[in-house]
Amino acid sequence: DAKTTQPPSMDCAEGRAANLPCNHSTISGNEYVYWYRQIHSQGPQYIIHGLKNNETNEMASLIITEDRKSSTLILPHATLRDTAVYYCIVRPRVETSGSRLTFGEGTQLTVNP
Amino acid sequence: SQTIHQWPATLVQPVGSPLSLECTVEGTSNPNLYWYRQAAGRGLQLLFYSVGIGQISSEVPQNLSASRPQDRQFILSSKKLLLSDSGFYLCAWSGSRWSYEQYFGPGTRLTVT
């Protein structure tokens, strides 16, 4: 599995866009980029995933560089409730039994009023 | 829409006592089900996964066991708890196609004293 690198922490002002970077320079052709977040004392929450095209859903946008070696998760209008640890993981999008999620250290995003 | 329930939310148990944590999923059929544990300040550890009724795979040998008596019910058990069993236990489900898109329950915080 490709290794990912994220900054340990970031701050963002409420109402502004939060841009969370992730480096995955060893990503292979069949691997997707997934983003999860975990608010303190809650279970992780799936946010979005993508292969090479930019993706957008009701929660966030995912921008993947053309060489796929890095990506950015964008929360367009961050709120205080977006304060959480954000995890970027790279996995093949293949149906296999026992598809375990393993999170690294992630990025602690703090949204300030 | 799909929802996942876990109970209890918190639990304090003495060493050597039994454990039973329950997880149920609504709004989907034949989900893949997962039990994870998250120790304080650490990442997720997959404990068990199940792709169908009565089908359990164990990831980490330990004094825990899991059962899936019904399609949308997943139970985590122990006959005798150890201090090292303390942690945040999370149940998750995924659909039949994209296993890395997993949805987590609220978790059970277990403290073994």
Image (spheres, coloured by chain):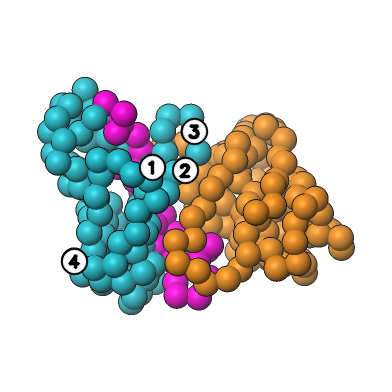
Magenta stretch?
A: B83-108
Q: Earlier in the sequence, mark 1 or mark 2?
A: 1
Q: Find out whether the residues at labels 1 and 2 contact each other: C-beta distance under 8 Å.
A: yes
Instruction: Report the amino acid beneath label 4.
Output: Pro
- Identify the disc placed on residue B69: 4
Q: Earlier in the sequence, mark 1 or mark 3?
A: 1
The answer to if B98 sits in the magenta stretch is yes
Q: Which residue is mark 3?
A: B42
Residue under mark 2: which chain is it in? Answer: B
Determine the colour of chain B.
cyan
Discs 1, 3 touching: Cβ within 8 Å: no
Q: Is residue A84 above or below residue B95?
A: above
Percent position (x, y) of residue A87?
61, 46
Percent coordinates x, y for residue A89 in the rendering:
63, 52
- Chain of residue at mark 1: B
Q: Residue at x 60, y 36 (%)?
A: A105
Let me know if residue A109 is in the magenta part. Answer: no
Q: Which mark is residue B37?
A: 1
Q: Residue at x 12, y 33 (%)?
A: B17
Q: Position of residue B79 (x, y in %)?
A: 14, 41
Give the SS element for disc 2: strand
Can the viewer see residue A70? no
**Type of residue at label 3?**
Arg
Helix, strand or loop for disc 4: strand
Tell me the SS state at disc 3.
loop
Task: Using the numbered discs, state the Cα–Cα distance from disc 1 to disc 3 in whole angstroms.
Answer: 10 Å
What residue is rendered at 16% in x and 35% in y?
Answer: B80
Q: Chain of mark 4?
A: B
